[in-house]
Image (cartoon, rainbow, N blue to C red):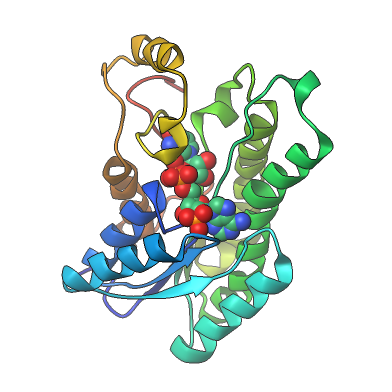
Amino acid sequence: MILQGQVALVTGASRGIGRAIALDLAKLGAHVVVNYATNAAAAQETVRAIVESGGSGELALFDVSDERQVDSGVKKVVDQHKKIDIVVNNAGVTSDNLLVRLKAEDWDRVLGINLKGTVHCTKAVCLGMLRERYGRIINITSVVGQTGNAGQSVYAASKAGIIGFTRAMARELGSRGITVNAVAPGYIETDMTDKLPEDLKQKFLRSIPLGRFGSGAEVAAVVSFLASPAAGYITGQVIGVNGGLLMA
Ligand SMILES: NC(=O)c1ccc[n+]([C@@H]2O[C@H](COP(=O)([O-])OP(=O)(O)OC[C@H]3O[C@@H](n4cnc5c(N)ncnc54)[C@H](OP(=O)(O)O)[C@@H]3O)[C@@H](O)[C@H]2O)c1
């Protein structure tokens, strides 16, 4: 129970990787705030699973792309719990298409949720962390933000932006005991990857040295480590969880 007494906010924790992260942090003793945007039933299921395994959690409905919603969502948590020790910026969406077919709205939506959402949540929690002189900020980027991928220009740009933002914040907040790191999953089985065409899945599979797709729990294990006191001397890093797809 190394996170006993800590409060963690996980964005996009109703499903997929976010849910796995929420469950893992709760198992380590953190009180977990389960953020979601639309899928209340799935978010309630995450909280139910946390409580069922002996942990503590609550729901927080806000759209990370809307700064005012983020500010009031974070304020509610801080009013009740006094602090947020850990934030995991996980909420994310894709809009896969060739650049010539992408519309301005697609760019605005993906950058708004993935990149600006990460900025909004970090800004909202970091004042409290600065006061506490402690914090763990973990941003979920993607191997696609490191390598690029045809048909994923806006997604790759948003995820590469998260890496630059992570490093800038690590330098800005380091002197106050706050670490800022990014986790870059490869191909993880969730709703997001479920909708990819079968031939593309097989193409990915052939390029993964471990010969299989990853699970949300395997990403969550790395996030939990970065959130723990044991990772106190790690900041500004991008940790790949990609089965060897990218070795950097
Ligand atoms: N799956 C992969 O292979 C993979 C690989 C690399 C990186 N990633 C990254 O990992 C993260 C999680 O991906 P996933 O595969 O678990 O996705 P997912 O299954 O599609 O789940 C997305 C989550 O984000 C939430 N969300 C979407 N828009 C939001 C908004 N505006 N405000 C707040 N929450 C919002 C969703 O909430 P609702 O349920 O309420 O809609 C949901 O909880 C993303 O950042 C993704 O880019 C995934």
Identify the residue shown where x is 24% and y is 65%.
49
What x and y, as percent, mark residue 80?
A: 47, 90
Identify the residue shown where x is 35% and y is 9%.
206
* The quadrant where residue 123 appears: bottom right
What x and y, as percent, mark residue 86?
A: 44, 67
Identify the residue shown where x is 37% and y is 33%.
188
Identify the residue shown where x is 26% and y is 76%.
4
Q: Is residue 45 visible?
A: yes
- Residue at the extreme front of the image, as rendered: 41
Q: Nearer the viewer, residue 84 or 113?
A: 113
Relative side of 8 to 154, left or right: left
What x and y, as percent, mark residue 57?
A: 33, 75
- Residue at the extreme left of the image, as rendered: 53
User: What is the count of numbered marks?
Assistant: 0
Q: Is residue 6 above or below residue 236?
A: below
Q: Is residue 182 visible?
A: no
* The quadrant where residue 145 appears: top right
Q: Is residue 76 above or below residue 179?
A: below
Quadrant, the N terminus: bottom left
Relative side of 78 to 119, left or right: left
What x and y, as percent, mark residue 20?
A: 31, 52
Q: Is residue 90 above or below residue 187?
A: below
Q: Is residue 63 above or below residue 201?
A: below
- Residue at the extreme right of the image, as rendered: 104
Relative side of 236 to 221, left or right: right
